[in-house]
Image (cartoon, rainbow, N blue to C red):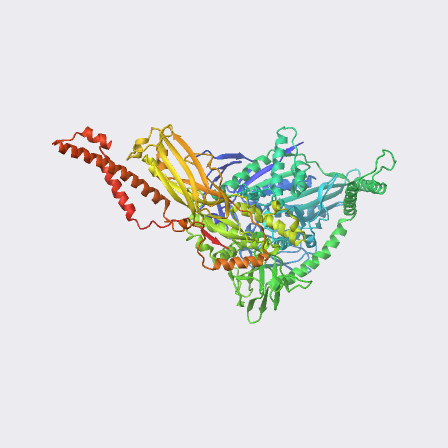
Amino acid sequence: MAEAVKVAVRVRPFNQREISRKATVIINMIGNSTEITDPDNPKATPKRFAFDYSYWSHDEYKEQPNGYLEPVGGKYADQKRVFDDLGRGVLENAWNGYNCSLFAYGQTGSGKSYSMVGYGTNKVFVPCQQRLDQHHRLAAPCYQVLRRSSCQGEGNSLGVEACDEVKVVVSKPCAHTLLLFHCIVPISCEELFKEIEIKRSTAVKGEEYQVTYSMMEIYNEQVRDLLNPASLKVKGGLKVRQHPKQGFYVEQLKAVPVHSYSEIDKKMTEGTKNRTVASTNMNATSSRAHTIVGLHFTQKKVNDSGKSMTKTSVINLVDLAGSERADSTGATGDRLKEGANINKSLSTLGNCIKALADQSQGKKGIIVPFRDSVLTKLLMNALGGNSKTIMIAALSPAHINYDETLSTLRFADRAKAVKTVAVVNESPTDKLIRELREENEKLKKLLESGGIPASGSGGGDGGSGEDAEIWKQQLEANKNALEEMEQSWEEKWAQREKELLSELEVEKKQKDKENTVPHLSNLNEDPALTGKIIHLLDKKVKIGCAKNGKAPDITLVGLGIVPKHAEIQNKNGVLLIPEKGRVLLNGTIITSKKQLKNRDRVMFGNTNLFLFIDPKVEKRDSPLPSFEDAQTEIAKNSGLNKLAGNGKSQEDLLLMEDLVQIWPMLGNANSMSEEMDKKIKFEIILVSPQARGEKHGRTQVFVKLKNLATKNEFMWDRDTFLNRYYMMQEMYQNFVDGENISAIAKVDDPFWEDPSTEMLIGCVHVYLQSLAYMIDMKEKLQITDFKGQNQGQLDIEIFPCTKDGKEIVDDFVDDPNELVGKEMHVIVKILQARGIPKKFKMSFCRYKFYLDDQPMKSAEGTGINPEYQLKKQLSFTPITKQFIEYLESEPLVIEVWGRQEPRPENSELTTEELMLKDKNKVNKPQQEETDDEDTEDMLQIDGQKVAELAMYKRRLERAENKVKKALAVVQKAKKNNQKMISVEEMEKVLSSGSRLKAVANIIIQTEKIKRATDLGQNVSQACSLQ
């Protein structure tokens, strides 16, 4: 019977980033329903979702002295509760012979790993073993908070004190394991092995219980076996095959026998270390990789009729990549938005979930695109086949992650509708073996006969070469399965035990050295990958990349690593000596030898970041510096902190966060360009909202692409750069693997930008106060770019008119509120531009007036003095208070866009030489180039003050005319010997009894404007960093 996927959501506490940004909570949970409030519209009704479980883990907890988060009241969901609800079901299904799948979904940092495997003191377990015939040391996380405990295991009582290691050994595992804390994966595995051990103690002949463990990663549509380092070097990754009965599987994936969770934890650590090496070697981003852990549980029993029965269960534990990447980082309008393999898996997963949900609702003709990505092929059973499936969606509580959290909730909501049909995987053992043998014989005959059936009937030319390849693959898969079934568990374990003892001895020696010898410990953006690579510094070591078969003492791979990169000496202190490579110490480039101190941060090249640890000094009495700390330090020492303001405001914090993220990527992109000789250079640009053609907002990070061969320049927003960056990584990996990247078409090259791409030349901000007084404005205003530099002049006219388009000249008002409820007609003319930079072969302008949804766009003009001749009459009936406020306070933003002249790439210099030339040019003081002498000498003053001055000038002129008329009335009265002037006659001249005061105010304000000394250029906050 079909069964719906079980879906749970869990919200975590604020992290440090959210606390520093004074985040507010937007998530609320009532029972099994979850609500999310839009922070931009807090009064609106929250969006509500219902799930099987809604876990509130944000607050209402108490931290115990050992660090465990304990509930205070009934709302907080701790690790134990999550396990009781979800983990126990996984165990029960496994014992019953069902396949099980457990997904963790959510944006990076939302708490996926916390629920799955836990971390810190919410994960710690201490294994207890029998017959300690050989010592082995296991590092215990958060050892300083452990308390003496004991486990009443058979023949052993283990006491754990506040020390950093526990001496245990694996000879034959004991089921008695002390679990201090709980989370789904560790306790599920522990409970499984505990039950296995109990059953083994009373097992009869023919009864066996077997567990094997596998671990793979999918990155950039390639599969890597994390338990087999050799597979990391396989070009294109391991092959994904399809078996008619087994479905999709990974060829040559290693599965190792395990007896306890401690062994699983060791293999998980080993896999994580290999993952760390792979991500560094591949210049990969770990948050964009999917990890799949597989537990294959087999039970063999003799039934009542004496037949040997085999029951199997495959438990898949899936940690998906950060879901904020599912939409290609939101790179709207980028021609390569969907071009990268790296984006494919999550987007295809979303498409599969949607299609499955539509199918469950009875929609016809729905095709589920499982075959469109490697991830969905391997999860086909979990999503639409033989499996009982659970999904945990991890949520951030913070308002700053609203979009990502809402996306996660919607994905989880769709997943509820997916249904699977799980069956018990149980068959007679001899039948399974017989069927495999029969199928093998059939496949052999097909291969021998070229695909013609043995009887010879049916005619035809036999099977194709493609069919033969498929038969060979199936035959190989069947052979492996047959060997697996025929080999006894004792034989498998005997082989594994030898490997294990060897591993334990190596690990013991390594741990002993780490406790005494200074060493480098890796830092990674993913905390789970930090501290997995250790380089001991017990002698003089050479650091660099391998060349011509010669490897240095510490071989590094990655961007910016050269053969003779650096040297470290351990003599009277540890000395770091840079040689021919780029070395950063605590965020600063060094060129001479420096003595290393405990917890120093060292970076080699662009991607190899380490922490120096001196065990004689290190006390672990405070948190170690993190990857984010080190990157922030590098960014600040690069001068980024000066660009991000004083760092106290929310805008400064947001800006600094973006800078810290983009800065290392920028360096990597330039290094990739240099190595692949792309002749492209990237620079960070900070652009104000005004320079982007917006009225409000915060300064944002943009990236300038400079084609060093053609001199063309383009601007990418943050999302476009991120999307292109991940595609650059993909291209670079292919380049390292020896592929001919020169054959890639330009339109598919992430470094290439079409010269015809529209580029924002600059903006003009036209302040409209004069319209509020029914006064025209006719000005030549400066076009300014993101740096606030002059890019020419724009000739504009804006004036009030009658309904039929005739300009109104004298009918002005002194109080704009008098217009409320009346009608207004306005003509906007953009006539021409003067002094546009020569590199733009054509240009046009566009704007939105008031509440316009679509911009008004001019015709395209050519040359440095283009004609636009854009004229538009606008009508507003009736005039509202809101419209008056708009005229008085909001500018009309006119954007000027252009297309650059295509130029041949005729440079014979390499990218490295061009970059050096460009750097030298930037470092020389230069006069900004302009194309029109008139624009060079133009007075650069603030646009709003220009508008105000023009408005007051016109109001003054018209007021003076009224005063002259009033004086004429007075002079006429004197001439006629009149001693009194009627009020009615004077009102005819002034139109209002309050006008004289208004005129006086206008004169005073105009004089203030004239005397103002701050009419200098008020440019947007924009800077360029390389």
Please tell me which residue is depicted at 28% across the width and 43% down the height of the picture: 1006
Q: Quadrant of residue 572?
A: bottom right
- Whether residue 875 is situated above or below residue 109 in the rendered picture: above
- Whether residue 159 is situated above or below residue 970 in the rendered picture: below
- The x and y percentages for residue 921 are 50, 58
- Whether residue 541 is situated above or below residue 753 in the rendered picture: below
> Is residue 1015 in view?
yes
Closest to the observer, 928 or 948: 928
- The x and y percentages for residue 63 are 49, 49
> Is residue 110 in view?
no
- The x and y percentages for residue 646 are 41, 53
- The x and y percentages for residue 178 are 61, 51
Q: Is residue 220 left or right of residue 636?
A: right
Please tell me which residue is depicted at 72% across the width and 54% down the height of the picture: 496
Seen as rendered, the residue at the extreme right is: 455
Closest to the observer, 927 or 7: 927
Quadrant containing the N terminus is top right
Closest to the observer, 957 or 98: 957
